Amino acid sequence: MNTISNLSVETLETGKIVLDDRHAKIIWLAELNTVFCQAKSEYIPTLKFKEIFAQIGEIVKNNVVTKVIFDKRSLKVFDQTAMTWYHVSWKKEMALYGLKQYIKILPQDNAFRMSVEIGKNRILMDNPTFRFEDYQIFYTETVEEALNK
């Protein structure tokens, strides 16, 4: 794993753009073993969300990926069905390939942040065997913080 510190947002320019559409931008930062995913719309429908993370999954399966950064600052609402799938199914599969660190950048919106907490509680209630503790999940406020985590 790369131990470079003091990475900045310009670091993203060194990566390979895997996807760039109206909903998301995915950048593969091979030197950092990191995938950066930036939400670009206020809402990502479930099927599109699954397509985006299927693409990230292909990167994880075919490379050494130790960290995924998900920049959600553009989102106004999130899809609970997509979030449940992401946590309960996708993360479990990606753990088989060694991915366990997730950095999230949330919008500066207290209602959104509260809905994330409500959503997490619902995931636990509906999926009693799922444990958030099995993953290294961190929240940061900036891309720089996320890259340096």
Image (cartoon, rainbow, N blue to C red):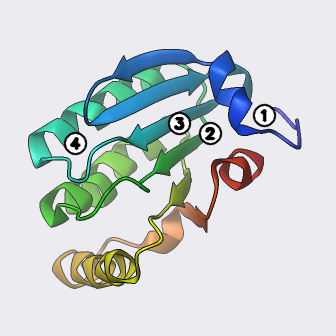
Q: Residue at x 39, y 77 (%)?
A: 113
* Amino acid type, residue under disc 1 in the picture: Met
* Image coordinates for residue 21, horizontal then vertical, percent: 28, 25
Read off the residue under disc 4.
49
Marks 2 and 1 close (CB-CB < 8 Å) = yes
Q: Residues within 10 Å of mark 1 (few under 14, many from 20)?
A: few
Give the numbered dot on residue 66: 2
User: Circle 3: is it few (<14), some (14-19), or many (20+) Cα within 10 Å?
Assistant: many
Q: Is residue 19 left or right of residue 118?
A: right
Q: Quadrant of the C terminus?
A: bottom right
**Which disc is residue 1 wearing?**
1
Q: Secondary structure at mark 3?
A: strand
Tag 3: residue type?
Phe
Q: CA distance from mark 1 to mark 3?
A: 16 Å
Q: Nearer the viewer, residue 73 or 48?
A: 73
CA gap between label 1 and label 4 equals: 28 Å
Q: Is residue 28 left or right of residue 118?
A: right
Q: Is residue 74 visible?
A: yes
- The numbered mark at residue 36 is 3
Answer few, some or many: residues within 10 Å of disc 2's Cα (few below 14, many 20 plus, some between 14 and 19). Answer: some
* Left or right, residue 15 beside residue 6: left
Q: Residue at x 41, y 73 (%)?
A: 131
Residue 18: horizontal and vertical position, in percent?
42, 17
Of mark 2 and mark 1, the one earlier in the sequence is 1
